[in-house]
Amino acid sequence: MAQMNDHMMQGMQAPMLILWMVAAVVVAALLAMVVYFIRPARSDRLLVADLAADKRRPVLRHDRAFGRDGNARAHDTIFILPDISHYTQFMTGNHFAFGHAQHVIFSLINAMIDAAAKTVQLSKLEGDAALFFVDAGRHSDVVIGDTVMAIFRAFFQERKRLAEANLCLCRACRHINELDLKIFVHRGQAARFEFRGSVDHFGTDVIVLHRMMKNGVRGHRYVMVTDAAATSIDLPGTFDTFDTEEDIEHVGTVRASVFEIDDETVAELSTLTHEPARSAVAETIRKLQENARSIKLALGQRLRRPTWRRSQDQ
């Protein structure tokens, strides 16, 4: 009998050992996931180009007027550049919040692109901004003004929808309503060329536009219109306005008017006129999907360095 008990104990030890090993692996995996999610996301992953690298990426229309023959003829161009305020702070967090932040930022940018695409063309995404352009004279100043306000409306309606449909308490989702928008409008001469699927611009006025973004104006929600674009845009509504000027190296002084967008205007623009908001459950599922995609991207970047960084190192 004693020998039988010994054999039974020995027979049970092998399965128990396997169970303990499996349990240890599961616990280790769970601990690794916890450590991964609470680690801060690295800043070199905060690229809208990565967010748009899927089937939802807006497709740029090929305009034969640009050509592929290297023609450097300058075009009289109106530029519209929406820039999301508090983007860096919003995108900086642990990996779990980073996945949801990706979903929020991409949704906001996509909404602005849809609103602007009716009258102007997307040039390219620039981190927390999207550059739009159109030939001067193609649209009236009223249409350009309406387009700028349509971008604001799309941004604030999408921001409201995302916040109201939110069930998540992560750092990013708690601060959706802190995201804001500034739009810069400039007119000038620029040559156009196509590069890797996007329409890029070359010229001093493109530099002026981007330098005006780094201004000394306090506030995170306004439209800045340079004097060069003043006759090309007529903003609908009444705004508190003041003038400013920036000294740009090698260019000189550039003057502009700043139109402040107050909270009352934001509340009016945020009112949904069509397309009811998705349910909280549907919105949460989308965020979880973005989070899973973020993890996949992060793990993939551990195995290989991104092409854009390799090209910079060469």
Image (cartoon, rainbow, N blue to C red):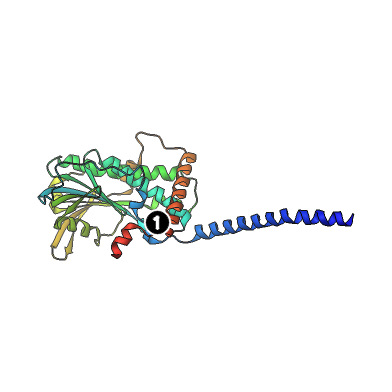
Res. 206 visible in picture: yes
Does residue 83 show up? no
Q: Which residue is mark 1?
A: 91
* Position in image of residue 135 (x %, y %): 14, 44
Q: Nearer the viewer, residue 154 or 240?
A: 154
Identify the element where label 1 is drawn: helix
Residue closest to the eye, 293 or 272: 293
Residue 44 sits in quarter: bottom left
> How many neighbours does mark 1 have within 10 angstroms: few (below 14), some (14-19), or many (20 or more)?
many
Name the side, left or right, on which 15 lies relative to 249.
Answer: right
Residue 314, located in which quarter of the rendered image? bottom left
Q: Can you give x and y, in whole percent of width and height, for residue 24 in the image?
A: 64, 58
Horizontally, residue 128 falls left or right of residue 228, namely: right
| Near-viewer residue (27 or 190) | 27
Identity of the residue drawn at 33% across and 57% down: 307
Residue 99 image point, x, y percent: 44, 52
**Count of marks placed on residues:** 1
Q: Is residue 59 above or below residue 14?
A: above
**Extreme left residue here?**
73
Location of the N terminus by quadrant is bottom right
